[in-house]
Image (cartoon, helix red, strand yellow):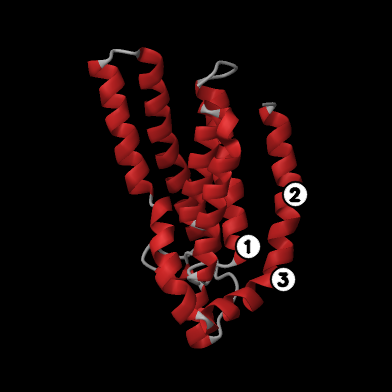
Amino acid sequence: MNIKRTISLILLIGTPLILLSYFFIDKTVALYAIAHDDTFSPIFDTLSKGADSTYWLIGSALLWLFYKFYKKHEHRAKTAGFFFLTIIATGLGANIVKLIFGKARPILLKKEDIFGFKWFVSPSAYDYHSFPSGHTTTAFSVATLLTLIFPRYWAAFYSYATVMALSRVLNWNHYVSDVVAGAMFGTILTLLLKTIIFKNNKI
């Protein structure tokens, strides 16, 4: 994989898609999801738990302990450690971006007809933490990590991430532009961290 070219392509396609979604798609899809809440939420609330960073952090930490102290396999221990640190870094990074943009969640569109950015909000202002989607960031970070380790199965990994992103829209926790931004952020930051830690070596 040519990481520099991949990142450029993601930015080239993703940035216009965020703008297109924000101006022409976000509100329509969110209102549809809200109107069909009884149908979508029970399914997609459960599905979206598959992108909860806690599970991936625990799993990678256990793998690190296993390979570091039991199997004493340094490379695999380093890979597990990289997995753990990347999930933390992408999650923290997404949370910082949320505070800067302060985008209203769909719940505010439903309750008060509020849509758009407030800018520079507090960590407690949860309803203004919509952009980017944290769960989507984690899902695409995981998909990218797994693809770097097992490139043959990339389609399965990104299918998982796409389903997680879709679940965040259909249970109206996020807008389409939020999940596109989360997908870009998780993928790009993971690739950048790979070049820093592993350089040209395989994970």
| Disc 1, SS | helix
Q: Residue at x 37, y 27 (%)?
A: 81
Q: Which residue is mark 3?
A: 23
Q: CA distance from mark 2 to mark 1?
A: 13 Å
Verify CB contact (< 8 Å) between mark 2 and mark 3.
no
Q: Amino acid at mark 2?
A: Ile
Give the mark nearer the N terminus: 3 vs 1.
3
Residue 64 circle label: none
Q: Is residue 70 left or right of residue 111?
A: left
Q: Crowding near pointer 3: few (<14 within 10 Å), some, many (20+)?
A: few
Residue 128 appears in the rendering = yes
Q: Residue at x 46, y 65 (%)?
A: 121
Q: Which residue is mark 1?
A: 177
Q: CA distance from mark 2 to mark 3?
A: 16 Å
Image quarter of residue 201: top right
Q: Crowding near pointer 2: few (<14 within 10 Å), some, many (20+)?
A: few
State the quadrant of the N terminus: top right
Residue 199 position (above or below residue 96): above
Q: Nearer the viewer, residue 194 or 129?
A: 194
Give the mark nearer the N terminus: 2 vs 3.
2
| Disc 2, SS | helix
Q: Which residue is mark 2?
A: 13
Q: Position of residue 29 (x, y in %)?
A: 62, 74
Residue 132 appears in the rendering = no
Q: Position of residue 150 (x, y in %)?
A: 53, 28
Q: Nearer the viewer, residue 28 or 197?
A: 28
Give the mark nearer the N terminus: 2 vs 1.
2
Image quarter of residue 44: bottom left
